[in-house]
Amino acid sequence: MEMPVFVDKKKDIGMKERIEALMAEIEALSCKSEQEIEEARVRLLGKKGSVTALFEEFRTVAPELKREYGQKLNVLKNTAAAKIEALKEAAAEAPAAGAASFDYTMPGDPVSLGSRHPVSIAREEIVSIFRKFGYDVAEGPEVEDDWHVFEALNFPPEHPAREMQDTFFISDSDNPVLLRTHTSSVQVRAMEKMPLPIRIVCPGRVFRNEAISARAHCIFHQVEGLYIDENVTFADMKQAILLFAREMFGAQSQIRMRPSYFPFTEPSAEIDVSCNICGGKGCNVCKGTGWLEIMGCGMVDPNVLEASGIDSKKYSGFAFGMGVERIAMLKWQVRDLRNYFENDLRFLKEFETSL
């Protein structure tokens, strides 16, 4: 004989009431923020939520009521999930607090723009001046071989002039690889490949193993120039440099030439320009002399022409070279060369008016 099953009707009736009450609560649910929506989701559908608790209690429901209550619980759970999703969508589409009163005609927040580096400004100005004189721009590799940096420029292997430039060598062989110490290597490549006449400027970065100080750095920039043609004279060179100085430092600028020595030019000279601060009268910038050194120059040595396959009996030429940092220091009275490499925004912003 089977034992009768006793069902707690009071418990079933209470569960039905709780489902109806919870359904009413879900339908009336409103939230003002994403945080409130998440709290409601956990309260209803979380592991310890109200809907989850009813599903746990469903296990004890009388068998003849399981179908009815099971359907009601599924509807309750789906309604709760749909309500939560609807609240999330409404929150995403709702305008931010205070948006209704925002004045869209107000100007936006200013955006701080960068500025060109003073070395770049000076280099471009130098190049643009020589472009006006009919010079083309030539460039070459920073990692070079010994032939283009030294030997083709009249630096024999044991020549003491090599000690003038302390070099960063990369490899040691019959033709060592190194970081170029000057952009004269670009001039050699131009003489090897370009048709005559040649009239070029060679801007670029160069490297020398020097101690870093206010007046020197192991990395700096040069612009070198080369002009080769028939009947080129020292007077042509002097006139070209004078025109450059007046374009760069002012129409009243004067130059003077002092004898010097470079292995690849003969005769050679150092060029000074009249101080653009004191007008040549003498000041602390020019150390009371009235003159500022800006570049070296000279007539291309016949050995250099011949090394690149140019007939030195038919052609002649001149070359010059200047440090871009040096020109920028003189133009804007920068006292410390290291400022160019420290990327201090306060320093760089001083040159925004030079653009």
Image (cartoon, grey):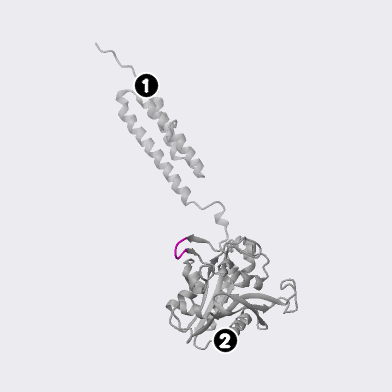
- Could you tell me which quadrant the N terminus lies in? top left
Circle 1: residue type: Lys
Question: Which label belongs to residue 150?
Answer: none
Give how far across and how far down residue 226 sits, in percent: 52, 79
In this view, 10 is above or below 333: above
Q: State the residue lying farthest toward the bottom.
A: 231
Element class at badge 2: helix
Crowd tier of the residue under label 2, counting other residues whose Cα lies within 10 Å: few below 14, some 14–19, many 20 or above: some
Residue 173 on the magenta segment: yes
Identify the magenta region. Answer: 172-176
Kind of residue at badge 2: Asp
For the question of whether residue 136 can be seen, the reply is: no
Please tell me whether residue 231 is drawn above or below residue 23 in the rendered image: below
Q: Is residue 288 left or right of residue 100?
A: right
Q: Which mark is residue 9?
A: 1
The quarter of the image holding the C terminus is: bottom right
What numbered label is drawn on residue 236?
A: 2
Q: Residue at x 42, y 45 (%)?
A: 86
Q: Determine the image quadrant of residue 117.
A: bottom right
Left or right of 256 on screen, residue 283: right
Whole-percent x, y for residue 202 in the image: 51, 74
In reply to whether residue 162 is colored magenta, the answer given is no
Using the image as rendered, state which of residue 79 and residue 154 is in the foreground.
154
